Image (spheres, helix red, strand yellow):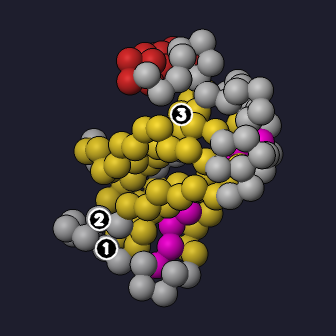
Amino acid sequence: MRHLRNYSVVKMLGLAAVAALGVVGPAEAVVINYAPVGIIAGQTFRVAIANFGEAPCEVAVMINGDGTSLLAERGIISVGGKVAVRDVAPADFRGRLEIFAQVLVSPDPGCQGMLQASVQVFDTASGQTLLATHGFVIEGGIPAPR
């Protein structure tokens, strides 16, 4: 029960932040929180959002590491038929950095069921993928893994 209460608080804070920034309306926002993963120097953390529809869709991507915002981009337009990515490759840390992403989106009727988001970790030098998550199909509610 405590987990659900904490989840609701996080969801409400995310919705309030997005509404305050004017990216999406609070009644429409979909928030996807990804579990943290560890990266080390020489690795890149990527959030990818594929748009399988035709309509452009607006999303916001936030990436945090050990309590510090590493990327906060709002108003990213995911163009129909393309993939929008946002990368973070922190070079000024030692050891292991726990990092996670949050994706906020307001699917209009042309976007519902057309967006899919995933998280990847890859070797920065070679581009070799080290980790890829299940994507989520964003359908206007909190999506379940497919």
- Rendered view: 61 above or below 107: below
Disc 1 element: loop
Of the residues shown, which amino acid type is indicated by label 2?
Pro
Q: Secondary structure at mark 3?
A: strand
Residue drawn 40% across the image and 73% down it: 43
- Mark 2 touching mark 1, by CB under 8 A? yes
Residue on which the image places disc 1? 41
Q: From mark 2 to mark 1, how far is it between C-alphas?
A: 7 Å
Q: Are marks 2 and 3 in contact (CB under 8 Å)?
A: no
Question: Can residue 48 be found in the magenta stretch?
Answer: no
Q: Residue at x 62, y 18 (%)?
A: 28
Callout 2 environment at 10 Å: few (<14), some (14 to 19), or many (20+)? Answer: some
Q: Kindly report which numbered mark, 2 or 3, lies closer to the viewer in this rendering.
A: 3
Residue 84 coordinates in the image, percent (x, y): 57, 56
Image point (52%, 81%), residue name? 127
Q: Which residues are magenta?
A: 114-123
Write down the residue under mark 2: 90
Where is residue 34, by image quadrant?
top right
Residue linked to disc 3: 104
Mark 2 vs 1, N-terminal side: 1
Instruction: Quarter of the image for the C terminus: give it.
Output: top right
Query: 83 left or right of 39?
Result: right
Label 1, label 3: how many angstroms apart (C-alpha)?
Answer: 27 Å
Give whichever of discs 1 and 3 has the lower sequence position. 1
